[in-house]
Amino acid sequence: MAEVYKQSFKQNYTDNVELSIYNCGNEKCAAAHTWGPGIRDHYLIHLVLSGKGTYKVNGETWHLRAGDLFLVKPSQLIVYSADAQDPWEYCWVGFNGACANKLAAQLPFTDLAPIHHARDSAVLEEAMKRIYQARGIEPQDEAAMIGWLYLFIAALMKETHESEAHTASSSSQYVLSAIKFIQFNYSHDISINDVAKNVGVSRSHLYRVFMSNVGKSPIDYLTEYRINEACNLLRSSSLSIAEVAISVGFFDQFYFSRVFKKAVGMPPSKYVASHTQPSAAEAAPSPEGEPLV
């Protein structure tokens, strides 16, 4: 049996609240070596390099081998164990932060299947090793580690996308691509022709798949998205109506006002007033002799 070893790094403090690496490393486990039952306070991804082992979560036991990955979520009760005859070697990275949930949701793991067999484990292994090699306590070390973490996550996202491409219908993929394009570009002067061109379909085909999957046309979706964003800005910012209009992709304030009134039932000016006027209780005068509270 190969010599048992462990190389690891733990980050005790970080300035990055968006995405932070908690720990990383590589380990050749002893036979039947087990962690748990226990929970982690962060996300943890292991990549099995050789050997075998098991991962227990949510009442299920998963048998893993080289090329498999398994995801641990914060606060999940888990157990993972090396095989007694052919114990595994794995590398891992633990992370958390404000955008960790969003990133984890785009990885090829689900609650029903928290494991994934890599199509290209060499790329993933290299990225994990780079995270460990960049370790350190200086700000530049942390930045490098997070950079390699993003590349590792990007490689996993690619596998997710390739897997979905084989299972999801082409029409739903067109709709998802169109929605993403709209959400990233609604503030610009884009048309439905621009959306269709970006997705790679004709305008008429985009209309059909939108009606089938969303129940509304692409232009109605774009308009609704812009108006929703305008409402958010009118409620939460000090921008003028003209500035809000431009910010959400309307470059004619009068046209914006007409579209807004049709969608919301009142013009933007009245919408602003309805969200800035004091309530009746606040506006009512206090009875004589009683202090205002």
Image (cartoon, rainbow, N blue to C red):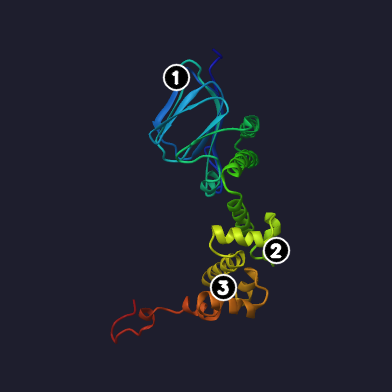
- The front one of 116 and 76 is 116
Q: Nearer the viewer, residue 289 or 32?
A: 32
Nearest to the eye among marks 1 and 3: give it.
1
Q: Which residue is mark 1?
A: 32
Residue 31 as seen in the image, left or right of residue 240: left
Q: Residues within 10 Å of mark 1 (few under 14, many from 20)?
A: some
Which mark sits nearer the N-terminus, 1 or 2?
1
Quote the CA–CA distance across marks 2 and 3: 33 Å
Residue type at mark 2 is: Asn
Which mark's residue is nearer the viewer, 2 or 3?
Answer: 2
Q: Amino acid at mark 1?
A: Ala
Q: Secondary structure at mark 2?
A: helix
Q: Position of residue 262 (x, y in %)?
A: 55, 77
In the image as oriented, which residue stretches furthest toward the left? 289
Residue 117, horizontal then vertical, whole percent = 56, 32
Disc 1 to disc 2, how far (Cα)?
59 Å
From the top left corner, tell me how far across and down residue 65 is, in percent: 53, 25
Q: Are marks 1 and 2 in contact (CB under 8 Å)?
A: no
Task: Name the residue that disc number 3 marks.
Answer: 238
Around disc 3, counting alpha carbons within 10 Å, would you say few (fewer than 14), some (14 to 19), or many (20 or more)? few
Distance from label 1 to label 3 (Cα)? Answer: 62 Å
Lower position in the chain sequence, tag 1 or tag 3: 1
